[in-house]
Image (spheres, rainbow, N blue to C red):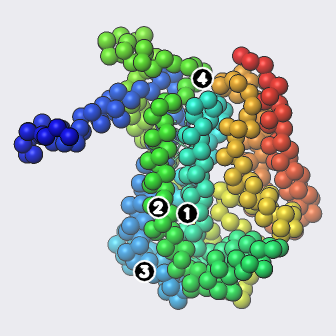
Amino acid sequence: MALINESFFSAEGLEKRLAGKKFWKTMMTEYWIPKDINFLWALGVVLAVTFSILIISGIFLVMYYKPDTNLAFDSVNYTIMQEVAFGWLFRHMHGVAASVIFLIIYIHMFTGIYYGSYKKGREMIWISGMLLFVTFSAGGFSGYMLPWGQMSYWAAAVITNLFAGGSLEAWGLVEWIRGGFSVNDATLTRFFMLHVFLLPLVIIMVIVFHFYTLRIPHVNNQVADDIDYDAEAEKYLAGNKKESKVIPFWPVFLSKDFAVLGVFFIFYFYLVFFNYNFAMDPVNFDPADGLKTPAHIYPEWYFLWSYEILRPFSKDLGLIAFAIAQVIFLALPFLDRSPNVAPASRRGLFKYWFWAMLIYVIVVTFMGKLPPTDALFANIGLIAAVMFFVLWIALPIITSKEKKL
Ligand code: HEM
């Protein structure tokens, strides 16, 4: 290493040691984004900001929350909601952000599917995104347990019980996960650890990786144009900004993101102040009681489309179907065999596949909330599950026959 002669306490000295300006240039002012994008490309930044809200509000909540089956319910419903100054605000902000982040994640995912942003060099972006989906799902599930209300307890009992299916029973997996024969104090403390420590840590690392995977292939654009970034960046830097197809991440792209973020905040704070119940289950305002099963147990809305797939099957098959549904989107870049990177509207049968999958997820989410007592609905659940798997089996077949654009 060449010795650095500049003083540690000078701007040049710091630059020599940390190369901050170079870093800023690589990551911000000369990180090129296509011009031809719409508001849907702002959702990644909306997600990053919503995650920051979850962390900040979570820090305040954890100061008063008590991970103990005798104290947890009161620490949330009395201490935080009634005694701590603005405790209610942090709880509402946390609960609403946790629910809304899934809505945005789903829109962000389906945007990627629609524009083919998972293909030809962008596979790593997709895979890291799916890792975020899985870790966020674990975060949502572990957080739902913490208030120790009726639905916290029973949803945890039902979901952990999935691991008691068939041969898994013999391995004692469910007891190992719960730390006992039923959901109990040890279950609560380990889910608490996962929720406030391990999962946020993993999520932060995966978000950094997700951003990093974007750096080389760059984000896609509305027409999936394969841009020559070096040539377009040169035009921009030479002052030919109008003709160039790209803009710098900072300040141009981010200023547009901030505009979308503003609209998002209106929606988000409307929910926080006036409609927070949408993120809370009424049954969860009753303390957990292991002897009183609620009439209808369901998870948070964002799990319903995959929960519904599990319902029509017996325990073993249900578990396998549920597990496949949770991770099948990971395989999308490899199951889509078409050479085309283009918006779905221009891609033959894939166009119908896209809309069928989107409608499927929305319809099944609404149906998942209904009690399974009605025979008609139980059958529709089975049809929906079969349809889901047929769509995935059809994907490589229809895309391999797609004409090259
Ligand atoms: C909280 C979690 C996430 C954060 C903070 C995040 C953040 C971002 C950001 C900032 C971008 C670039 C701008 C944009 O296109 O919006 C992006 C792009 C992308 N993300 Fe995510 N993302 C998250 C979750 C996901 C998930 C769950 C998926 C789906 C598997 C995903 C897939 C993608 C894809 C494919 C792109 C590239 C879009 C393109 O090239 O046009 N992300 N993400």
Tell me whether circle 2 and circle 4 mark residues in contact (CB < 8 Å). Answer: no
Residue on which the image places disc 3: 79
Label 1: few (<14), some or many (≥20) within 10 Å? many
Label 3: few (<14), some or many (≥20) within 10 Å? some
Question: Disc 4 versus disc 1: distance between alpha carbons?
Answer: 33 Å
Residue on which the image places disc 1: 139
**Element on which disc 2 rests:** helix
**Element on which disc 1 rests:** helix
The residue type indicated by label 1 comes to: Gly
Q: Is mark 3 within 8 Å of ligand 1?
A: no
Q: Is residue 268 above or below residue 88?
A: above
Q: Is residue 161 left or right of residue 248?
A: right
Q: Identify which residue is drawn at 44% across, 54% down.
A: 204
Residue on which the image places disc 2: 200
Residue farthest toward the front in the current orientation of the protein: 1
The residue type indicated by label 2 comes to: Pro
Using the rendered image of the protein, determine whether residue 269 is visible from the camera's viewpoint: no
Question: Disc 3 versus disc 4: distance between alpha carbons?
Answer: 52 Å
**Element on which disc 3 rests:** helix
Mark closer to the chain start, 3 or 4: 3
Question: Disc 3 versus disc 1: distance between alpha carbons?
Answer: 23 Å
Residue on which the image places disc 4: 224
Tell me whether circle 1 and circle 2 mark residues in contact (CB < 8 Å). Answer: yes
